[in-house]
Image (spheres, coloured by chain):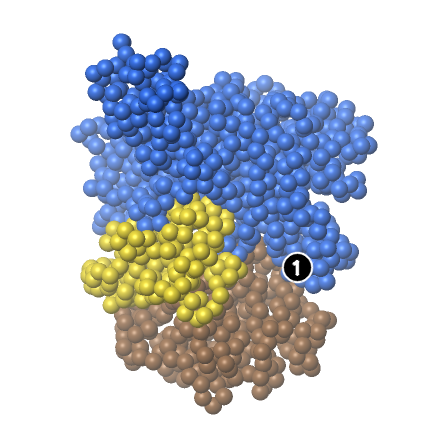
């Protein structure tokens, strides 16, 4: 049907956004509104001896200034980590405490020291500048390798050597043995550059304490309002869950950065109680660069061994992961179970070993950012494949084909079992779409214009649909990663879906409705989706890890199963037929093979009027379900990037970017394509443009768009996309997830293309014009690449 | 942004008067640099004197072999102006490449030149075309006007009213934008003028816009990009940051100079 | 404080505001037209683009007091009653938005570029659209569908280039 699963339906939610009527957190203004600004640690490491707020408090319109020690006295808890990692020696990880506001030590530039509440935002900011800090600057550790070196400055007293954990996966001895006898060994050191997520809507919070009701409401920019309420209640002791409502209204992008519950939200809630005012804080972009959790920041040394036929015999990685000054909510799992478990890529690898050391530094916290661990794994694998192919004189696509996994389910050497896939055909389709056959001629033509053309591949697999609760629990997760849904059929036959997933650009209000419309055979317009409010939806785990399709929609399907079962009973009873003969088609509940039927509004009405229900049946038609996935899902794809490098300037133009993906079943191709466009663009951003840079003292150099380079429209091409779907057998709709694939797979395709063009592999991300030009200077005759 | 008092005088005299009584007055023109600076609390003028209300301040005219552009002429207007396009197309093209469309709709030539941002485009054209900076007090030769990064010959309460550009025989501009900010990382304006070949470089130098004598010499002999094949610029005095080392900027000066010459019309 | 009077979305408004009030704040806080968004501090992201006297400008980089007597059009003012502007329709049909935060600025810049190119008789090619979008940053869409939407809307806007103002 034209609106159901597989239909290219224009989004239902768009109208409010294109008319300027979206409601984001900063658009919320309530009675009694006051505004907050934060006083922040001005250096990378300091002992704060005193906070002098007298100047600020003397300003007319300044309501209050509060500090960390006061918060501690009031019993507000430290920030928590959601995943405990065990080191290879069996010891639990060690991490420093994270006070929502500094009690004694400031540990990165931007660490919150005090909150100022004032009558206007501008006044709050000016007053924050007037707060004087008495502090003693301490030695700091900034870069991850420096922080792990002997004698490095300690970020936290209780974390010796700044080493949070030393974790391993796979079989070290087996890998050593295989590498010792390998026909060819490829080695490479790779830096996975530190990124700033940069959702276009800055973080914001409106905290409202209602003294009469002893109740709090928090409007906030969150990807998971229920998780926010849970931790605010259970760990930060702001208020018990039934006295705390969290609303994540329209949210302007997240990309991981809005999973976490940051110090500012906690502090605004507490400050609302302290001041008796509604407290609103909206980050400006400079604060966002300083304090939003960053992403990536790995340094990896990789070794891959091959036999004479080009088959991989072993793969080994040693990684230093920069966690920053504090361990953010999912920071510990990103470099371990979201990275190490993906080291097999889409290849049949007989031996794998990964070691990850997580390191504290005096920089902003680093946590999951679109892809989270999987881009880092993919980058390591795919640069190694391309490098090895060149070293062995093989076609890089052929080397991949020799090693592709072809039978499913496939058990890797690093925990995961892949569900389904067809990697050869996907690569065939990509090569055809990218016209790889015509590349040599295009390269020659470019050379005639003095330009260097290159072509790079990335064939990847990733784990989405996060995640089976018992499995992640056994690996250290503090929470289960199921999802909830409730389907309400109203007395007039319209349907409301309540979901614990949260849409902040993904289009759930359309795709979730498509699933229901398809299943019940009713018009899309008759279905609405409710999300993002803990008072409306009972619980949910939120949106990240490409989970809203495979987990969130599966919960809806499970609830629909229950609704259908009850509807069939009602219909059978009303139509005096056997329940086994009832079928649901085109919006009607029918007796198969007859003209006897009931429309959904008749079923709804019957359920709620309840004059004539089967004996013992409760009135109403509303069913809830919790869905816990059986496994991750494993989207995969083949990406081909073609670039042209200007050897005079080092500028890289992306001429063509082809992505053929396997996302399993697709609900709305237009929305899925949009996810790929955005993901690939973020991957191109990582590969070419973006990097968070601190100077040696820990001051943030890339503190605004003047220095942090965001992909703009003229940095990227129009994309060439296709799909080769092998539906996942493990969830009811066969979904695999599509939100992160582009960002996961694309960076190595871009870098492989550039190194192909310039004839040297000495290149790290981001491949800025400066970096490419510098690399070219090391190649004696750049045009020798021709 | 700190509190400030806004004035919109109708004449240069009134503007000067407003500046004269202000504790710390600043001229506001397009505001595309000043306002962001104030938002970040990096500037806090007590008074802003908006010169856009002054009659004729944005006029563009041609006479005696020169194009005169009023200080309040916006970049988009300069880019689209038929006289500028006819007589100094390189200047129209430069104006059409400043910032982005919304910035060009507000930013003005006078503001850009008076601010002398080392990464602004206009100063290279002013210097290479040997333009005259016209103020309420005097006329200042380009050579004397720019005095290092953000520094000019302007005195207190001196207001740039117009820029007068002699029409060159041929001129071209090429910019290598900073990938993040899109300001000029290296911008080269090359012109064949009555006074010989003049090449001015913006974005690259520690002291702001400068003339590149080595390039001028080579182009004086032959105004073609081939003439620059063997010319390289030293990296002394070049800016260095995360986007470009001094060596890279020096290299780009020659590359952009060649492209400016190739573009020249 | 100064009194500022202007026409916003066709309606006369007059407010007493501090001289340092930016147009973006005037629209969002004084007029509660919250469709205009602020996404950066350095005048680069373009989420705040509105039209002032027919030109697209960044409302975060203009003082409200400097616009006394001006005519301002925001994202809330481009539809004709319930009938969407062709640029709005095209963004919906081509999935030119995801989170929606940059969208108002994208739409206002899109209308402005189509108007300028059509009044100059220039062809608005894909390359031209991408260059024209230099001052509008989107993190969600990768620009692909924004470019398609503007291309499509340019077609439907032919002959009505100035109707939006």
Quarter of the figure with the C terminus of chain A:
bottom right
Tell whether A110 sits left or right of C29.
right
Quarter of the figure with the N terminus of chain A:
top left
Which residue lies at the image location 67% right of the left edge and 39% below the top edge? A428
Residue B102: x %, y % from top left? 41, 63
Residue A381: x %, y % from top left? 66, 35
Q: Which of A496 and A202 is in front in this view?
A: A496
- Residue under numbered circle 1: A646
Q: Note the chain letter of the blue one.
A: A
Q: In which quarter of the image is residue A304?
A: top right
Tell whether B16 sits left or right of A760.
left
Q: Please say if A635 is above or below C46.
A: above
- Residue, far left: A212
Residue A16 seen in the current view: yes
Residue A647: x %, y % from top left? 68, 59
Residue A765 seen in the current view: no
Q: Note the chain letter of the yellow one.
A: C
Chain ID of residue with mark 1: A
Q: How many marks?
A: 1
Q: Which of C161 and A130 is in front in this view?
A: C161
Which residue lies at the image location 56% right of the left edge and 72% below the top edge? B173
Residue A160: x %, y % from top left? 56, 29
Which residue lies at the image location 51% right of the left edge and 84% below the top edge? B166
- Residue, far front: A594
Does dot 1 land on a helix, a strand or a loop? strand
Q: Which of A500 and B204 is in front in this view?
A: A500
Colour in which the image shows chain B: brown
Q: In which quarter of the image is residue A607?
A: top left
Density class for disc 1 (Cα within 10 Å; few <14, some 14-19, many ≥20) is many
């Amino acid at each position: 049907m034209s609106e159901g699963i597989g239909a290219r339906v224009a989004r239902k939610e768009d109208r409010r956004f294109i008319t300027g009527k979206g409601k984001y957190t900063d658009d919320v203004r309530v009675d009694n509104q006051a505004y907050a600004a934060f006083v922040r640690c001005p250096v990378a490491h300091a002992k704060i001896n005193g906070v002098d707020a007298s100047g600020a408090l003397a300003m007319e319109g300044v309501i209050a200034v509060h500090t960390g020690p006061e918060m501690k006295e009031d019993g507000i808890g430290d920030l928590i980590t959601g995943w405990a990692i065990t080191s290879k020696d069996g010891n639990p990880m060690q991490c420093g405490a994270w006070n929502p506001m500094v009690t004694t030590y400031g540990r990165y530039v931007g660490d919150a020291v005090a909150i100022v509440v004032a009558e206007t935002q501008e006044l709050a900011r000016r007053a924050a500048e007037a707060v004087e800090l008495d502090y003693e600057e301490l030695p700091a550790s900034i870069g991850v390798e420096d922080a792990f070196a002997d004698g490095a400055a300690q970020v936290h007293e209780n974390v010796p050597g700044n080493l949070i954990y030393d974790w391993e996966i796979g079989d070290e001895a087996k890998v050593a043995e295989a590498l010792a006898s390998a026909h060819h060994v490829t080695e490479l050191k790779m830096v996975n550059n530190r990124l700033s997520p940069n959702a276009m809507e800055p973080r914001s919070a409106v905290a409202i304490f209602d003294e009469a009701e002893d109740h709090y409401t928090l409007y906030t920019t969150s990807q998971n309002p229920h998780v926010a309420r849970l931790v605010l209640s259970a760990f930060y002791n702001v208020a018990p869950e039934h006295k705390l409502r969290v609303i994540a209204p329209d949210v302007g992008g997240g990309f991981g950065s809005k999973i976490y519950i940051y110090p500012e939200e906690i502090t605004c809630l507490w400050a609302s109680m302290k001041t008796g005012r509604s407290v609103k804080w909206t980050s400006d972009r400079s604060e966002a660069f300083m304090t939003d959790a960053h992403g990536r920041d790995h340094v990896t040394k990789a070794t891959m061994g091959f036999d004479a036929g080009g088959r991989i015999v072993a793969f080994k990685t040693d990684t230093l992961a920069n966690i920053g000054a504090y361990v953010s909510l999912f920071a510990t799992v990103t470099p371990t179970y979201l990275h190490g478990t993906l080291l097999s890529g889409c290849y049949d690898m007989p031996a794998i070993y990964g070691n990850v050391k997580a390191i504290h530094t005096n920089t902003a916290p680093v946590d999951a950012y679109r892809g989270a661990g999987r881009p880092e794994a993919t980058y390591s694998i795919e640069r190694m494949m391309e490098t090895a192919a060149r070293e062995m004189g093989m076609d890089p696509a052929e080397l991949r084909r020799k090693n592709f996994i072809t039978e499913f389910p496939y058990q890797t050497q690093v925990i995961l079992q892949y569900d389904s896939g067809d990697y050869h055909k996907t690569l065939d389709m990509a090569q055809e779409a990218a016209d790889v056959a015509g590349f040599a001629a295009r390269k020659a033509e470019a050379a005639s214009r003095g330009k260097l053309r290159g072509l790079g591949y990335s064939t990847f697999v990733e784990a989405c649909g996060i995640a089976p609760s018992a499995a992640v629990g056994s690996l250290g997760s503090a929470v289960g990663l199921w999802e909830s849904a409730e389907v309400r059929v109203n007395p007039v036959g319209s349907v409301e879906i309540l979901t614990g997933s949260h849409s902040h650009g993904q289009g759930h209000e359309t795709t979730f409705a498509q699933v229901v419309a398809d299943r019940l055979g009713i018009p899309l317009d008759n279905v609405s989706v409710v999300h993002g409010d803990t008072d409306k939806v009972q619980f949910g785990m939120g949106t990240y890890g490409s989970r809203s399709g495979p987990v969130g929609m599966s919960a809806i399907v499970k609830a629909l199963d229950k609704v259908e079962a009850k509807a069939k009973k009602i219909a059978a009873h009303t139509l005096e037929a056997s329940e086994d003969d009832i079928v649901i088609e085109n919006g009607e509940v029918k007796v198969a093979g007859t003209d006897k039927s009931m429309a959904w509004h008749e079923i709804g009405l019957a359920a709620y009027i309840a004059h004539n229900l089967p004996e013992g049946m409760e009135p109403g038609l509303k069913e809830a379900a919790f869905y816990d996935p059986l496994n991750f899902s494993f989207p995969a794809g083949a990406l081909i990037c073609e670039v042209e490098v200007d050897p005079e300037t080092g500028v890289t133009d992306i001429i063509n970017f082809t992505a053929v993906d396997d996302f399993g079943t697709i609900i709305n191709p237009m929305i899925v394509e949009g996810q790929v466009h955005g993901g690939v663009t973020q991957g191109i951003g990582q590969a070419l443009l973006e990097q968070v840079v601190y100077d040696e003292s820990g001051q943030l150099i890339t503190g605004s768009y003047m220095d942090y380079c965001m992909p703009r429209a003229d940095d990227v091409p129009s994309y060439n996309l296709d799909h080769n779907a092998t539906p996942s057998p493990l969830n009811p709709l066969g979904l695999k997830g599509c939100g992160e694939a582009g960002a996961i797979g694309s960076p190595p395709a871009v870098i492989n293309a550039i190194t192909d063009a310039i004839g040297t592999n000495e290149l790290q991300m981001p491949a800025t014009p400066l970096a490419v030009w510098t690399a070219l200077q090391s190649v004696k005759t750049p045009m020798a690449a021709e | 942004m700190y509190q400030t008092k806004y004035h919109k005088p109708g004449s240069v005299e009134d503007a000067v008067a407003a500046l004269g009584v202000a504790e710390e007055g600043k001229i506001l023109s397009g505001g595309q640099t000043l306002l962001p600076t104030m938002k970040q609390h990096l500037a806090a003028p007590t008074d802003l004197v908006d010169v856009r209300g002054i009659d004729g301040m944005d006029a563009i005219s041609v006479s005696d072999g020169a194009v005169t552009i009023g200080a309040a002429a916006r970049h988009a207007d300069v880019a689209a102006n038929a006289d500028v396009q006819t007589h100094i197309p390189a200047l129209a093209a430069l104006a059409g490449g400043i910032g982005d469309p919304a910035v060009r709709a507000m930013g003005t030539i006078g503001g850009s030149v008076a601010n002398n941002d080392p990464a602004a485009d206009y100063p290279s054209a002013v210097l290479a075309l040997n333009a005259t900076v016209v103020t309420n007090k005097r006329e200042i030769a380009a050579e004397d006007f720019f005095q290092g990064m953000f520094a000019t010959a302007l005195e207190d309460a001196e207001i740039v009213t117009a820029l007068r550009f002699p029409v060159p025989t041929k001129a071209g501009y090429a910019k290598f934008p900073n990938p993040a900010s899109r300001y000029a990382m290296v911008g080269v304006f090359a012109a064949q003028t009555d006074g010989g070949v003049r090449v001015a470089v913006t974005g690259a130098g520690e002291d702001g816009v400068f003339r590149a004598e080595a390039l001028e010499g080579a182009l004086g002999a032959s105004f073609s990009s081939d003439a620059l094949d063997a010319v390289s610029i030293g990296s002394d005095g070049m800016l260095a940051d995360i986007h470009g080392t001094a060596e890279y900027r020096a290299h780009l000066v020659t590359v952009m100079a060649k492209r400016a010459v190739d573009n020249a019309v | 404080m100064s009194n500022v009077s202007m026409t916003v979305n066709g309606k006369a408004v007059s407010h007493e505001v501090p001289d340092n009030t930016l147009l973006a704040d005037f629209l969002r806080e004084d007029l509660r037209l919250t469709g205009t968004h602020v996404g950066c501090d350095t005048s680069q992201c373009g989420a705040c683009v509105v039209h002032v006297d027919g030109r697209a400008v960044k409302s975060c980089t203009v003082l409200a007091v400097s616009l006394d007597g001006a005519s301002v059009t925001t994202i809330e003012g481009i539809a004709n009653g319930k009938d969407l502007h062709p640029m709005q329709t095209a963004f919906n049909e081509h999935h030119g938005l995801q989170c929606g935060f940059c969208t108002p600025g994208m739409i206002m810049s899109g209308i402005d570029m189509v108007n300028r190119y059509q009044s100059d008789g220039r062809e608005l090619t894909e390359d031209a659209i991408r260059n024209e979008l230099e001052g509008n940053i989107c993190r969600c869409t990768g620009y692909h569908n924004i470019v398609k939407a503007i291309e499509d809307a340019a077609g439907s806007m032919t002959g009505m280039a100035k109707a939006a103002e």
